[in-house]
Image: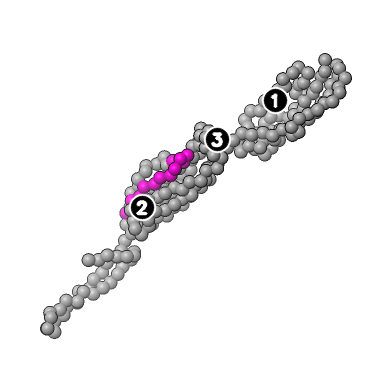
Amino acid sequence: TYTPTERGRVDGVLTLGVVGEDIANEVPLTGTGVAPQLQISDVNNQLRAEPEENDTTTFTIRNTGSAELNASWSIADPFNVTSDADISLGPQNTTTATIEFAPTDETEQSVFEDLTIATESDAIGDEQVPFEGEVRQSSINVVPSSVAFGNVTTDSGATQQVTVINTGTTDIADLSATTKTTNFRIGEGTTSTSDIATRGFSSAQRVTVQPN
């Protein structure tokens, strides 16, 4: 029986003789241990998406060994594998896998899960590939948080300025600015709302009071 413990060629000798006789024969033995070998490349571990939307990444798996590689992969929600769950790769062959991050409204802002690649090879065992998911949320901050106009003469006007800051983790496609009473209005010259489309940017909004 030949039971290799590692890849590569092994040489040996089988000696056969007759008990009590000066007779012996040597039989050369050779064997080559083969095994699959897993190589993972082109991995983007960080995915970002808004709730009820998704982000995907595709990476490459290569069998760099000398035997067939049989494996399956799995990952916990809100990630999932959109490729076939089971793979079979011959020596020096490659395939790709696609991971999807699909958060819901209940998903925490940051999620960490491992993709488990379970192989049938004792030489490899199971491989873990970490993934991080970021849930993008819309959020704004207004500075100052309140505006006091003080005493303003009727039939005249006074203007104050507030700054709206995009403090969320996603772009804002549409920002509205309104007032609830006719005495206050959004003044002319207000900075375009597109200025805060990118997170971290701000927009100046002018508010005017006109007492009756």
User: Is the residue marked by circle 1 packed among few (<14), some (14-19), or many (20+) residues within 10 Å?
Assistant: few
In the rendered view, tell whether residue 188 sits above or below residue 116: above
Q: Residue furthest top?
A: 212
Please identify the quadrant where the C terminus is shown: top right
77 drawn magenta: yes
Q: Position of residue 17 (x, y in %)?
A: 15, 79
Query: In the picture provided, is 132 more to the left or to the right than 172?
Result: left
Q: Element under label 2?
A: strand
The alpha-carbon separation of the residues under discs 2 and 1 comes to 57 Å
Q: Position of residue 32 (x, y in %)?
A: 29, 65
The disc labelled 2 sits on which kind of residue? Thr
Q: Position of residue 59 (x, y in %)?
A: 45, 47
Please identify the quadrant where the N terminus is shown: bottom left
Q: Is residue 27 visible?
A: yes
Q: Are marks 2 and 3 in contact (CB under 8 Å)?
A: no
Q: Which residues are magenta?
A: 68-80
Q: Element under label 1?
A: loop
Residue denoted by label 3? 50
The alpha-carbon separation of the residues under discs 2 and 3 comes to 33 Å
Q: Which of the labelled discs sits on residue 119, or is there none? A: 2
> Considering only order in the chain, which callout, 1 or 2, is on the residue closer to the N terminus?
2
Residue at x 19%, y 76% (from the top left corner) = 15
84 drawn magenta: no
Residue denoted by label 1? 177
Picture quadrant where residue 156 is located: top right
Q: Is residue 100 visible?
A: no
> Considering only order in the chain, which callout, 3 or 2, is on the residue closer to the N terminus?
3
Q: Element under label 3?
A: loop
> Considering only order in the chain, which callout, 3 or 1, is on the residue closer to the N terminus?
3
Residue at x 74%, y 18% (from the top left corner) = 181
Q: Position of residue 188 (x, y in %)?
A: 77, 24
Numbered label tally:
3
